[in-house]
């Protein structure tokens, strides 16, 4: 992306023009603005410090040059340290922005003069953003963040400004963009991915942002991250958007109509509202102005580079802002900000923040080292850092609370215990004092009881008298009550009548009365009623004289009117005294009432008022009738009540007397009760005191033992609490950073962190022996995890703890399925949901689990995760309708906090992007040696001793339960103690609980003690089987290491365990444990070797055996072996002593018996033969001596890791020989250097001085050098007996490296057994027997192999009822569109039980995930036909599913090795009818045989490497098939055999089509000419000088096959036309290949020679190399005239060549010096050890030239030491040429580019003689007697002399002056000085010319590899020129072509 154009210049001026004259007030302001804009446009895209430093220096220089001002003065404001110089760090504070005044209009782009003001303004914006956003951002705005905010604001505030933010995930790109958009008040849009997100959704999103910008005229930021690129067309559309502000064919016509309508007004104002094109242009211009695309891309991996190359607009149309790693000040600011409120001492906050920075920086360096050493990627990002700090805060708070709670409980428990202990004595004294008080109280109580008894008799008399009177009073009261009830009953009858009268009155109104008053002549009923009323009111009628009769009569109506007129008439009626009506009134009224017309109803008809009054009158009359009866009763009642009152008064007096007596008795009783209570209290107090005393004793006795432990625990917790400050920080670091690392790296990191804590000022308290499990682990929980399947090693316990405390979801690197198994077991009870990304409905399962809080296991992911899982990984929850929710894909689901998410991958070495690393907690769950050993121990014990295994398992379960119970009981005891209020002794329940808990605790402890003792015994018994477990775990890692060699060498732990069980079952039984274990070890090792070897290529089988041998021998504990030997010897001696003692006792008894017989006078029996036999029988046999210690493997010779590394590398060669080579005539300097370095190894030096011995008598060692089988030779004395087998191989490596592979073969045969090096036949039936319908069989292919024929033949032999003629086989060759057809066949095969073969899986990348699902799920289902088999064929490919490889049965079927096997295969494929079908049988058969020989030769020639072919071509069966068809066609169609056409078509077309190197084509045609020639038809013609190979006479096909059977198994080099020495080349090549492969899987060295650490070795080597490096060459040192120009003004051609070469060498020298300095600093820790430096470090250890140097160096194959010597020699040659002028002879090997030198020589000659350079070519003359440059006395007139060339695979015969064959064993020889003479008009013969009998055009190469990059000339860049050399008479040029003879500029040593 370092591409700059005029757009960038315009961006600078666009930025400069964004200001106003007010904001750029002076020249200095303008200068600063110009520098700032240049920095933003150019410097921000620079990626490393050297580039940025260069730009800074240039800016400084140009500022001072063009602005005529001192840079430091202009920027003096930024000079923070006051040293008068502004450095790049201080220049970071140069910032401009237009947002410093919020709300300003217009915004002014100006310089930020006050950092604090900028911080305050941006902080305010951030606060506002967080208060309104659903996704608030918790950012710390340190300088780094503010810099980037200003930069992004600057970019997006410019019209059409787009940004490319480059940085790893988690560096703040997206957060700062959101903040910048908010500051600028822009809309921000970002796509939301889901599983179904595709082209349609993408285009909808693009339309949306374009409409926002163009249609709605809103400034819009489109934020897009590379993690959202699901399809590459996303990037293409983005590129178009950046470049043209539109995406082709995005908008539909309907969209545009709406858009045009909405923008017409604005377009009109701009004068662009005409036709559609104008409107469209206006819309695009608005989009260009308002839309700002911000791309967030990661530089990790190749995708970034590829995208920038494919879409240049990503660079040219954006402003790049490179988000580098956070600087230290940023890290420190963040830590300080976050740690402000942490509960630690204030003086520790600063060191804690610094410690966080150190941990972060250290882990970055650790991850780089991890990549270099372990080849594993892990990225440390700012998100990891934030996770560290957040995790620290959370965990510290949690752990402090936890420890504080525990501590308080212990303190409380101890206080309660202490109080209890103190109260025991006090309670005893209290109990004694209570006794006399209790006696006195009992006496007082007795006396009181006697007084009460007397008083009670008197009281009883009074009580009896009162009781009698009470009975009489009660009788009287009953009578009164009866009378009262009778009166009340009568009244009850009267009262309703009265109420009815009143109710009747209530119905009347004054109007009703008035109505009556108005009556002049009232009706009779009314008159009648009124009269009655008047009588009641006792009003007399008016006496009047009747007008007619004249008599006086009573006028009641006048009286009635008067009455009615009285005020309150109705009230008077209502209040009428009803109880005092006179009798006469009643008598009068009764007459009225008796009249029939005096009825209310009848009266009512006449008048309502009268009707009411009528009712009143009737009611009063009725009432009066009742009351007359009641009143006498009332009077009687009153009298009775009066009598009763008298009786009651008398009774009351008596009762008061009685009460007085009772009160007296009660007082006495109360007194008595008081005395009784006092007595009872005293008794109770005494009893409570006893109970408390008893409880106290129980507590003190029961928990007294806990007191010491609790005190210790409480004190320890106090220490732990202080140490939490550091311990939790280290734990947070482990959780945030170290999950992905292996155990060794974790231990290194934590050790370094502990050291940093202890050395900080002030020291941060932490545990000296810190471990994550110790600080954070819960042992009870870990034990439970172990039961659930977590391996029992510390590494796994750490992993479990990380999962337990981690804040992010874990992603387990789990190739052996350990984590998967553990998670399934641990979460099984909670309803674990298991999903795969390949499941069609996995998202639905996930949504359900999230909603209901179920744990989810997402298993077997690859390098990426579905983007729609991101919200879940980031836990992006939000509140919706009061519920916690999360968005998954398109759905919003409720988020249950019980939900858990686990992810596993089967990949051994996945490469996850930084973005993914920040979202998950990456945990390395690869099994460790200890963990596997423990598992395999369990397996073997379960198999061999199931009783032990069962008992052990029970004990583990019981132990786990016991520990859990003990912890729970302790918690319960402490809880009871802490929760009890007041005195614990008063809480009977609490004391009971404590006592019961303690009893139970003691019982459990006792049980656990017994269980522990039992477990120790069981473990001792199990330990007997540990050797097998240890050995087998080592073997597994040997198998696992093979995956580093080939992609297809993948094996699962499950497969291995099943194999292990089979091995145990099949091993020979023995009652003796040692023998049985040896049998298992030997049998299983070979069984495993067989099973693995069937899936290995031939080239890797010996390597695998060697790996087993070395790993097993390295693991032998030789001290243990010696201890076992000593123990066996001691046991033998003890047995001898005991046997001797028993024999002596027996003899003494016999002698005593004989003596007793003699004393008794009995005759002693004569000793006879029988007695002697009996004597012999009685004598017990002597104990058997222990004999030699028997190893399961090996010869009993230890091997040393340093020796093994030396054997693989040859030691570190610095190029100098400390001791001169004593036999340089036959012993190479490289070999002698290895001998010297070997002697430096302590283990070798201990055996003697090997170099001195070789120097004393080299001839003794030459025997080894000259031997045909040096690996079998005995080393000269005393070394033959002194050296171990590995040390012997080290000697062989030095003297005869070509025989290292045979030596390894012998070593493996001796250490493991001969069967490990014998070839293993391809056994398809046995592989089939191991398979099943659910297990696929995988053929791993190599070039030229095709297993189909074998498979079809085998299928034909598998007959069944369904397929009686042989198994049906359906083959599908995978490729474009074949997936569905393959699936159809698989589905059918699973039902019908036939076989399906999927060929060439490596070509079907897109089908592989589907194939994995089939193998994982479909094949495992019930209902799959048992005869079904799935066969897969694939070349080695990284895309092949790992799961299928791990669990499938793998087979390799390589093409046959060797000419004989190759030809046999060809003839096996020829059908009889084809063989006999040609009309010219004799020539056809001869030529077919010749063709098959040619085909075999060119294929097998590849084994010789560059000697065979420059480039390795993959000739295959199709080439020979095509050539055979061509041959038959020519023979059938032509009468005469067209030899020329046959040769041309076969060589140039059929085979030559593959050949890309012209010299290889020459070789191919030279070989073919030996076989396609007329002589082939002659039966006497032979292909080889020995006559072994020829075309047999004409015969049938079987005769030719029989002839092939007679050919040798391995062919001699003569078959290929090569010298016997070619085999040495082949063997050396095999050696190098094997050493490199073996080295690639070796762990990095941890210690080396002389006990030095690798750091010391590399540092010393770097210092030594650096001290010898001369400074770069300076053209100013050139000798006079060297660079003078000619008369025509041209430089001399050779001087130009020299200048170019010096420039290249100086570049290399600077690279070498700088890298050596940096490496030494990195080793000291002064600078970070980058990945390149780490690789350089490893290369130094492995004696390789660092890749850092090779990138700028000349081609070379030398090891490091040889390279250094060669480098110095080249520099010296160039310096001599420069300072002393043109040399007499040129050392061509010293050039970077010798081809350029050749051209320069021709050009100089052409200029000298004025000849056309095109007509010039070189002629060559080898000078006689001129071996080296020193032999040259003067330079030639024309041309140049060249020295230092080598002849490869031939020699220059100095006597006969021609090219001759090599001496035996000498591969490379020196060529004398050669004169290269330019000749006019000479043209060398073409490469494909007929064979030349005089001269061979010998190619000259730079290195022995010969191959290079093919240039346009058809020649390799490694090729220099063809040198014409005379050849030995009797040979022709083809002879030397076939020998592979070439010239070399440099050797490999």
Image (spheres, helix red, strand yellow):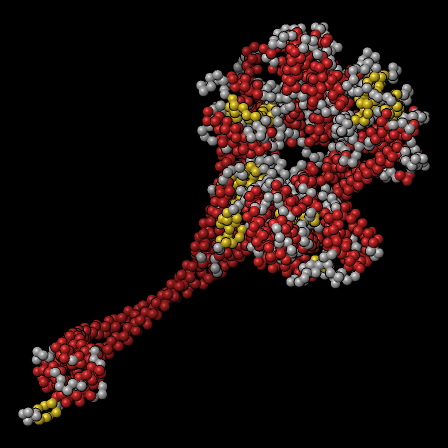
Q: From the image, which quarter does the C terminus lie in?
A: top right
Residue 1761 in view of the camera:
no
Residue found at x 72% / y 42%: 1730
Q: From the image, which quarter does the N terminus lie in?
A: top right
| Left or right: where 1831 falls relative to 1911 | right
Q: Position of residue 1593 (x, y in %)?
A: 67, 6
Q: Position of residue 524 (x, y in %)?
A: 10, 83
| Left or right: where 1073 falls relative to 1784 | left
Residue found at x 78% / y 53%: 87
| Left or right: where 957 falls relative to 932 | left
Residue 1826 in view of the camera:
yes
Q: In this picture, is 967 found above or below 594? A: above
Residue found at x 32% / y 69%: 669
Q: Nearer the viewer, residue 727 or 717?
A: 727
| Left or right: where 900 falls relative to 673 | right
Q: In this picture, is 602 found above or below 1082? A: below
Residue found at x 86% / y 39%: 1671
Q: Quadrant of residue 1604?
A: top right
């Amino acid at each position: 992306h370092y591409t700059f154009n005029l757009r960038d210049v315009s961006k600078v001026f666009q930025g400069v023009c964004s200001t106003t004259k007010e904001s750029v007030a002076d020249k200095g302001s303008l200068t600063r603005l110009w520098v700032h804009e240049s920095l933003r446009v150019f410097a921000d895209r620079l990626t490393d410090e050297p580039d940025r430093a260069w730009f800074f220096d240039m800016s400084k220089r140009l500022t001072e040059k063009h602005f005529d001002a001192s840079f430091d003065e202009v920027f003096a404001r930024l000079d923070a340290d006051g040293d008068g110089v502004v450095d790049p760090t201080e220049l970071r504070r140069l910032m401009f922005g237009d947002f410093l005044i919020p709300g300003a209009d217009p915004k002014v782009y100006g310089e930020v003069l006050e950092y604090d003001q900028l911080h305050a303004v941006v902080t305010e914006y951030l606060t506002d953003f967080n208060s309104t956003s659903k996704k608030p951002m918790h950012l710390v705005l340190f300088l780094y963040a503010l810099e980037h905010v200003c930069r992004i604001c600057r970019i997006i505030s410019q019209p059409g400004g787009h940004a490319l933010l480059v940085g790893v995930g988690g560096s703040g790109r997206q957060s700062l963009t959101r903040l910048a958009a908010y500051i600028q008040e822009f809309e921000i849009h970002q796509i939301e991915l889901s599983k179904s997100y595709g082209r349609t959704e993408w285009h909808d999103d693009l339309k949306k942002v374009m409409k926002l910008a163009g249609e709605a005229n809103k400034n819009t930021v489109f934020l897009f991250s590379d993690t959202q690129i699901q399809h590459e067309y996303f990037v293409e559309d983005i590129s178009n958007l950046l470049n043209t502000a539109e995406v082709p064919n995005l908008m539909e016509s309907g969209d545009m109509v709406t858009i045009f309508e909405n923008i017409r007004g604005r377009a009109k104002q701009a004068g662009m509202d005409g036709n559609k094109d104008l409107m469209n242009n206006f819309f695009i211009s608005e989009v260009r102005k308002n839309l700002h695309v911000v791309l967030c891309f990661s530089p990790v991996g190749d995708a970034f580079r590829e995208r920038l190359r494919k879409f240049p607009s990503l660079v040219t149309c954006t402003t790049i802002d490179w988000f580098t790693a956070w600087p230290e000040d940023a890290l420190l600011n963040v830590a300080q900000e976050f740690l402000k409120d942490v509960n630690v001492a204030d003086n520790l906050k600063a060191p804690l923040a610094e410690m966080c920075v150190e941990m972060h920086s250290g882990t970055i360096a650790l991850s780089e080292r991890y990549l270099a050493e372990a080849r594993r990627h892990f990225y440390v990002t700012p998100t990891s850092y934030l996770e560290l700090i957040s995790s620290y805060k959370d965990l510290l708070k949690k752990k402090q609370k936890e420890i504080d709670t525990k501590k308080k409980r212990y303190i409380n428990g101890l206080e309660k215990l202490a109080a209890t202990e103190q109260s025991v004595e006090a309670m005893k004294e209290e109990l004694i004092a209570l006794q006399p008080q209790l006696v006195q109280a009992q006496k007082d109580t007795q006396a009181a009881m006697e007084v009460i008894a007397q008083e009670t008799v008197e009281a009883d008399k009074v009580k009896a008298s009162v009781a009698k009177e009470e009975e009489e009073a009660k009788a009287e009261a009953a009578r009164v009550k009866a009378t009262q009830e009778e009166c009340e009953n009568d009244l009850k009858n009267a009262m309703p009548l009265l109420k009815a009268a009143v109710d009747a009155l209530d119905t009347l109104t004054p109007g009703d009365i008035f109505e009556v008053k108005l009556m002049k002549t009232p009706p009779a009923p009314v008159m009648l009623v009124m009269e009655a009323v008047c009588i009641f009111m006792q009003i007399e009628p008016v006496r009047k004289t009747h007008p007619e009769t004249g008599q006086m009569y009573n006028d009641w109506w006048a009286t009635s009117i008067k009455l009615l007129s009285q005020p309150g008439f109705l009230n008077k009626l209502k209040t009428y005294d009803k109880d005092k009506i006179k009798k006469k009134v009643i008598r009068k009224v009764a007459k009225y009432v008796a009249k029939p017309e005096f009825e209310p109803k009848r009266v009512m008809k006449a008048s309502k008022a009268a009707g009411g009054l009528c009712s009143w009158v009737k009611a009063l009359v009725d009432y009066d009738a009742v009351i007359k009866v009641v009143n006498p009763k009332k009077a009687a009642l009153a009298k009775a009540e009066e009598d009763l009152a008298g009786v009651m008064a008398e009774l009351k007096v008596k009762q008061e007397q009685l009460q007085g007596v009772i009160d007296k008795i009660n007082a006495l009783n109360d007194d008595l009760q008081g005395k009784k209570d006092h007595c009872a209290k005293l008794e109770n107090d005494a009893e409570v005191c006893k109970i408390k005393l008893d409880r106290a004793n129980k507590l003190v006795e029961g928990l007294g033992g806990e007191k010491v432990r609790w005190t210790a625990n409480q004190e320890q917790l106090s220490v732990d609490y202080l140490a939490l400050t550091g311990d939790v920080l280290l734990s947070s670091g482990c959780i945030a950073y170290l999950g992905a690392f292996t155990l060794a790296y974790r231990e290194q990191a934590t050790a370094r962190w502990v050291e940093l804590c202890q050395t900080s000022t002030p020291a941060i308290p932490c545990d000296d022996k810190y471990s994550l499990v110790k600080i954070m682990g819960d042992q009870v929980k870990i034990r439970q995890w172990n039961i659930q399947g977590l391996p029992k090693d510390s590494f796994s316990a750490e992993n479990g703890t990380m999962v337990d405390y981690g804040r992010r979801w874990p992603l387990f690197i789990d190739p052996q399925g350990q984590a998967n198994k553990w998670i399934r077991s641990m979460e099984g009870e909670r309803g674990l949901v298991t999903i795969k990304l390949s499941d069609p409905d996995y998202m639905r399962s996930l949504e359900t689990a999230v909603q209901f809080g179920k744990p989810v296991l997402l298993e077997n992911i690859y390098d990426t995760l579905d983007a729609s899982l991101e919200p879940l990984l980031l836990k992006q929850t939000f509140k919706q309708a009061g519920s916690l929710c999360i968005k998954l894909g398109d759905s919003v689901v409720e988020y249950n906090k019980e939900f858990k998410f686990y992810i596993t991958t089967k990949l051994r070495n996945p490469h996850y992007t930084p973005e993914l690393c920040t979202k998950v907690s990456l945990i390395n769950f690869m099994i460790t040696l200890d963990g596997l050993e423990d598992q395999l121990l369990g397996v073997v014990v379960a198999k061999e001793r199931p009783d032990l295994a069962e008992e052990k398992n029970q004990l583990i379960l019981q132990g786990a339960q016991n520990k859990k119970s003990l912890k729970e009981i302790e918690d319960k005891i402490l809880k009871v103690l802490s929760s009890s209020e007041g005195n614990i002794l008063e809480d009977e329940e609490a004391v009971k609980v404590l006592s019961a808990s303690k009893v139970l605790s003691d019982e459990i402890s006792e049980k656990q003690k017994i269980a522990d003792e039992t477990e120790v015994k069981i473990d001792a018994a199990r330990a007997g089987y540990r050797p097998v477990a240890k050995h087998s775990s080592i073997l597994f890692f040997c198998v696992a290491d093979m995956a580093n060699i080939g992609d297809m060498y993948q094996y699962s732990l499950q497969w291995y365990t099943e194999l292990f069980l089979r091995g145990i079952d099949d091993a020979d039984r023995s009652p003796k444990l040692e023998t049985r274990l040896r049998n298992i070890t030997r049998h299983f090792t070979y069984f495993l070797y067989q099973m693995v070897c069937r899936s290995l290529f031939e080239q890797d089988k010996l390597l695998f055996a060697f790996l087993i041998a070395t790993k097993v021998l390295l693991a032998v504990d030789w001290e243990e072996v010696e201890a076992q030997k000593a123990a066996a010897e001691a046991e033998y001696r003890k047995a001898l002593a005991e046997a001797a003692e028993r024999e002596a006792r027996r003899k003494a008894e016999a002698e005593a018996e004989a003596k007793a017989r003699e004393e008794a006078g009995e005759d002693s029996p004569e000793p006879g033969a029988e007695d002697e036999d009996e004597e012999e029988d009685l004598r017990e046999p002597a104990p058997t001596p222990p004999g030699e210690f028997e190893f399961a493997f090996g010869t009993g010779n230890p091997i040393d890791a340093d020796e093994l590394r030396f054997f693989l590398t040859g030691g570190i060669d610095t190029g100098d020989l400390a001791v001169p080579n004593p036999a340089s005539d036959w012993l190479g300097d490289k070999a002698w250097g290895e001998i010297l370095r070997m002697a430096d190894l302590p283990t070798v030096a201990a055996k003697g001085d090997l170099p001195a011995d070789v120097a004393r008598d080299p001839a003794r060692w030459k025997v080894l050098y000259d031997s045909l089988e040096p690996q079998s030779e005995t080393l000269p004395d005393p070394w033959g007996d002194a050296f171990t087998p590995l040390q012997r191989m080290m000697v062989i490596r030095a003297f005869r490296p070509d025989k290292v592979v045979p030596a390894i073969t012998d070593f493996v045969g001796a250490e493991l057994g001969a069967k490990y090096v014998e070839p293993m036949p391809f056994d398809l039936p046995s592989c089939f027997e191991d398979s099943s319908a659910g297990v696929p069989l995988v053929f791993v292919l190599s070039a030229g192999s095709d297993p189909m024929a074998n498979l079809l033949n085998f299928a034909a032999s598998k007959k069944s009822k369904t397929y009686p003629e042989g198994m049906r086989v359906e083959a599908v060759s995978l490729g474009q569109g074949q997936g569905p057809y393959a699936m159809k066949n698989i589905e059918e095969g699973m039902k019908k039980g036939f076989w399906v073969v999927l060929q060439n899986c490596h070509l079907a990348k897109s089908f592989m995930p589907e194939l994995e699902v089939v193998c994982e799920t479909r094949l495992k289902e019930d209902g799959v036909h048992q005869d079904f088999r799935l066969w897969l064929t694939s070349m080695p490919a990284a895309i092949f599913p790992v799961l299928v490889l791990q669990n499938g049965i793998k087979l390799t079927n390589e093409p046959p090795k060797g000419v004989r096997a190759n030809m046999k295969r060809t003839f096996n494929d020829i059908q009889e009818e084809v063989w006999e079908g040609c009309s010219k049988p004799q020539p056809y058969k001869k030529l077919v045989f010749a063709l098959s020989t040619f085909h075999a030769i060119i294929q097998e020639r590849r084994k010789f490497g560059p000697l065979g072919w420059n480039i390795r071509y993959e000739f295959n069966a199709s080439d020979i098939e095509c050539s055979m068809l061509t041959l038959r066609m020519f023979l059938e169609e032509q009468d005469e055999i067209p030899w020329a056409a046959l040769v041309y078509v076969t060589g140039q077309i059929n085979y030559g089509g593959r050949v890309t190197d012209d010299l290889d084509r020459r070789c191919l045609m030279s070989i073919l000419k030996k076989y396609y020639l007329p002589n082939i038809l002659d039966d006497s013609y032979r292909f080889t000088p020995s006559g072994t190979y020829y075309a047999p006479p004409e015969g049938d096909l079987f005769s030719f096959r029989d002839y092939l059977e007679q050919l040798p198994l391995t062919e001699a080099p003569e078959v290929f036309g090569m010298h016997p020495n070619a085999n040495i080349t082949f063997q050396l090549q095999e050696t190098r290949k094997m050493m490199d492969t073996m080295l690639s899987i070796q762990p990095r060295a941890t210690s080396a020679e002389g006990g030095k650490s690798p750091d010391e070795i590399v540092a010393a080597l770097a210092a030594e190399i650096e001290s010898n490096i001369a400074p770069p060459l300076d053209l100013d040192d050139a000798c006079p005239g060297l660079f003078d120009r000619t008369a025509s003004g041209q430089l001399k051609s050779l001087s130009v060549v020299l200048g170019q070469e010096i420039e290249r060498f100086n570049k290399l020298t600077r690279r070498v010096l700088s890298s050596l300095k940096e490496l030494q600093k990195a080793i000291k820790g002064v600078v970070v050890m980058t990945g390149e430096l780490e690789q350089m470090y490893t290369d130094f250890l492995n004696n390789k030239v660092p890749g850092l140097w090779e990138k700028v160096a000349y081609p070379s194959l030398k090891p490091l030491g040889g390279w250094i010597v060669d480098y110095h020699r080249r520099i010296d040659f160039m310096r001599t040429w420069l300072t002393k002028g043109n040399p007499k002879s040129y050392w061509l090997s010293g050039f970077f580019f010798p081809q350029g030198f050749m051209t320069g020589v021709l050009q100089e000659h052409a200029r000298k003689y004025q000849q056309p350079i095109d007509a010039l070519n070189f002629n060559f003359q080898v000078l006689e007697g001129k071996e080296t440059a020193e032999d040259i006395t003067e330079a030639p007139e024309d041309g140049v002399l060249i020295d230092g060339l080598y002849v490869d695979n031939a020699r220059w015969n100095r006597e006969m002056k021609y090219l001759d064959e090599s001496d035996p064993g000498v591969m490379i020889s020196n060529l004398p000085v050669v004169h290269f003479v330019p000749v006019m008009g000479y043209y060398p013969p073409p490469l494909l010319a007929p064979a030349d009998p005089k001269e061979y055009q010998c190619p000259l190469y730079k290195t022995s590899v010969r191959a290079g990059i093919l240039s346009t000339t058809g020649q390799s860049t490694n090729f220099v020129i063809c040198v014409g050399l005379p050849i030995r008479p009797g040979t022709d040029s083809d002879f030397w072509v076939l020998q592979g003879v070439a010239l070399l500029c440099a050797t490999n040593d």
